[in-house]
Amino acid sequence: MLAIAFTTEGGRQLVFSAVLDEEENKLRASKAFIIKSKLHEPSDWVLSEDGKRAGEKIWNDTINPGRSK
């Protein structure tokens, strides 16, 4: 898998996260994610045990392709 993004896209997310207000910081701390410069809460599935296992598998496949358990 090849992940490609433009510098401006990554920079925009960094600036957005740096200027969050207090309420947004609380949401971000709860594993929220950003879409089009708006914070969104993770779904119930993402927070479930199945979601956590899937997240770990995706992370391992991304970091060590072909070496997941």
Image (cartoon, rainbow, N blue to C red):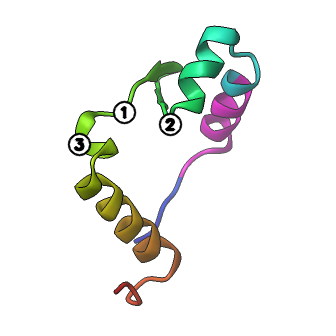
Residue 19 in the image: x percent, y percent?
A: 75, 16
Residue 8 in the image: x percent, y percent?
A: 66, 35
Q: Amino acid at mark 3?
A: Trp
Judged from the image, the secondary structure of the residue bearing numbered disc 1 is: loop
Residue plotted at (33% across, 43% down): 47
Q: Amino acid at mark 2?
A: Lys
The residue indicated by pointer 3 is 45
Residue plotted at (76% across, 24% down): 18
From mark 3 to mark 1, how far is it between C-alphas?
8 Å
Give residue 25's quadrant in the image: top right
Q: Is residue 13 above or below residue 2?
A: above
Asked if disc 3 and disc 2 are in contact, CB closer than 8 Å, the reply is: no
Q: Which mark is residue 33?
A: none
Asked if disc 3 and disc 1 are in contact, CB closer than 8 Å, the reply is: no
The residue indicated by pointer 2 is 31
Image position of 22 (left or right of 39): right
Q: Residues within 10 Å of mark 1 (few under 14, many from 20)?
A: few
Q: Is residue 14 above or below residue 51?
A: above
- The magenta region covers 5-15
Asked if disc 1 and disc 2 are in contact, CB closer than 8 Å, the reply is: yes
Q: Earlier in the sequence, mark 1 or mark 2?
A: 2
From mark 1 to mark 2, how far is it between C-alphas?
7 Å
Image position of 48 (left or right of 16): left
Q: Main secondary structure of the magenta part?
A: helix
Q: Residues within 10 Å of mark 2 (few under 14, many from 20)?
A: few
The answer to if 7 sits in the magenta stretch is: yes
Give residue 60's quadrant in the image: bottom left
The residue indicated by pointer 1 is 42
Instruction: Name the quadrant of the C terminus.
Output: bottom left
From mark 3 to mark 2, how far is it between C-alphas?
13 Å
Residue 9 in the image: x percent, y percent?
A: 60, 36
The answer to if 3 sits in the magenta stretch is: no
